[in-house]
Image: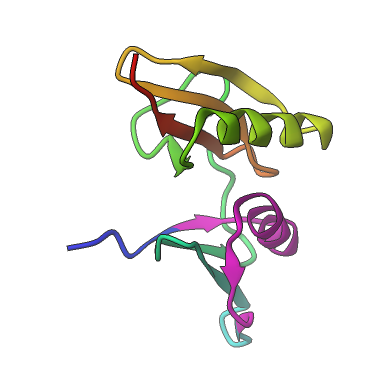
């Protein structure tokens, strides 16, 4: 069994599509629209085959989970894996240079990963990570 996709509601559909395309290599499909439901979405497919569905529709309430200061139960982050420590560092530098906040790292963790945490334009928490030995 595989994880087919993860879905995110957003009020910034085009901005999130561009963010995940530019910084994480997601390839968007053609925008899907259901005018009767005022629903719009994209599926972004990543090199691994994993997909992210980003969706918008009027009147979806704001998420009450504070992903920066006080995390709560439920899905809290999406992790993107890369092959090397240098790729983690390079992605962190790219995001910093483009004025995105780095919450922590890059750092070695106690479970054998090297990673940093950041936020997408909707403040969804993301990790960029690789395994390391030593």
| Front-lying residue, 10 or 117 | 117
Q: Position of residue 77 (x, y in %)?
A: 45, 37
Give the residue at x 46% y 23%. 114
Left or right: 84 with respect to 131? right
Q: Is residue 80 magenta?
A: no
Question: What colour scheme was applied to this rendering of the protein?
Answer: rainbow
Q: Is residue 89 visible?
A: yes
Q: Is residue 54 above or below residue 77?
A: below
Q: Is residue 69 visible?
A: no
| Front-lying residue, 121 or 100 | 100
Image quadrant of residue 30? bottom right
Give the magenta-colored segment's residue range.
7-32
Give the residue at x 65% y 44%. 122
Quarter of the image for the C terminus: give it. Answer: top left
Give the residue at x 58% y 17%. 104
Give the residue at x 71% y 27%. 101
Q: Is residue 87 above or below residue 68?
A: below
Quarter of the image for the N terminus: give it. Answer: bottom left
Left or right: 106 with respect to 7? right
Q: Position of residue 106 (x, y in %)?
A: 57, 20
């Amino acid at each position: 069994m595989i994880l087919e996709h993860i879905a995110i509601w957003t009020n910034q559909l085009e901005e999130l599509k561009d963010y995940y395309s530019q910084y994480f290599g997601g390839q968007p499909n053609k925008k899907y629209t259901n005018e009767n439901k005022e629903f719009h979405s994209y599926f972004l497919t990543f090199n691994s085959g994993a997909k992210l569905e980003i969706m918008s529709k009027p009147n979806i309430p704001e998420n009450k989970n504070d992903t920066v200061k006080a995390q709560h139960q439920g899905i809290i982050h999406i992790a993107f894996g890369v092959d090397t420590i240098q790729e983690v560092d390079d992605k962190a530098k790219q995001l910093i240079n483009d004025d995105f906040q780095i919450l922590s790292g890059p750092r070695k963790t106690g479970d054998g990963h090297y990673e940093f945490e950041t936020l997408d334009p909707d403040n969804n928490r993301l990790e960029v990570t690789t395994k390391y030995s030593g």
